[in-house]
Image (tube, rainbow, N blue to C red):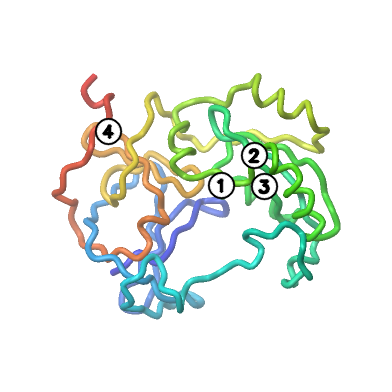
Amino acid sequence: MQVVGYETGVDGPPALLIARDGAVTAESLEPGTELSYSLGDRHCAGVLDDGAHTPCSAADAPYCDRHASRWPCARCTGECSLPLETCREEHAIYLAAFAPETFKVGVTRSWRLDTRLREQGADRAAHLRTVADGRVARQIEAEIATDIGDRVRVPTKVSGLHESVDEAAWDALLANFDPIETFEFDYGVDLADRPVSETLASGTVRGAQGRVLLLDNGGSTYAVDMRDLVGYDLESGESDRNLQSSLGAFG
């Protein structure tokens, strides 16, 4: 069996998508779930199509060049010809906050705003503007990004999971705009200490924030980027490799 995808829990419980003999099942990651897998070889996760899985043996992971999906809007700054049908939909420009004081600007189709923010694991957010299409949205995003930035890496998100958003810094940022609406998100994750970044699939699920899965194992809490699990073959039974422990494990 192989991890071939994941769900962040926006429209239901978070889950790992696991392929067995061409069929795909969702392994629930609800809090309290016990996972007991060791990681084997990692290779291309192949193709998912309507609940069926076509494997690929290419060594590149999580996807080989043939199966990698490349989103044409990833680095768009509005100098485009609206290449996708979705580019012509109404778009929202937003700010997202990640504890304690990391901020970014982003855009999404307006009807997906709440979903997109939860997918990213944002702690706070502000809807700045709604515009007619993706091209206009990208132009505005590019302008704001010169001061704020438009990307936040997963390690940066993990580093602040045990903290709260700096209210003063967030309020100071919003003072430069006139938001339509603001958001606060609670993922049910209660951490006293910074979790240890690790790639594993064994332990007790504490919760998930965006694509970051939190697992309790051996007295420590680990933060697992679920994308880093995609492509791994799984074997039943916990791994016997040594894991770095958090300082809290010795308290």
Of the numbered discs 2 and 4, the one sitting upstream in the chain is 2
Q: Quadrant of residue 72?
A: bottom right
Classify 167 as above or below 180.
above
Dots 4 and 3: beta carbons under 8 Å?
A: no
Residue 227 percent coordinates (x, y): 42, 56
Q: How many marks?
A: 4
Amino acid at dot 2:
Ala
Of the numbered discs 1 and 3, the one sitting upstream in the chain is 3
Of the numbered discs 4 and 3, the one sitting upstream in the chain is 3
> Callout 4: 10 Å neighbours few (<14), some, many (20+)?
many
- Find disc 2 in the rendering and name its residue: 96
Q: Residue at x 37, y 66 (%)?
A: 61
Quarter of the image that includes the N terminus: bottom left
Q: Residue at x 53, y 53 (%)?
A: 12
Describe the element under mark 4 as helix, strand or loop: strand
- Find disc 1 in the rendering and name its residue: 120
Dots 1 and 3: beta carbons under 8 Å?
A: no
Describe the element under mark 1 as helix, strand or loop: helix
- Find disc 4 in the rendering and name its residue: 220
Q: Residue at x 60, y 36 (%)?
A: 185
CA gap between label 1 and label 3 equals: 10 Å
- Find disc 3 in the rendering and name its residue: 114
Dots 1 and 2: beta carbons under 8 Å?
A: yes
Describe the element under mark 3 as helix, strand or loop: helix
Of the numbered discs 3 and 2, the one sitting upstream in the chain is 2
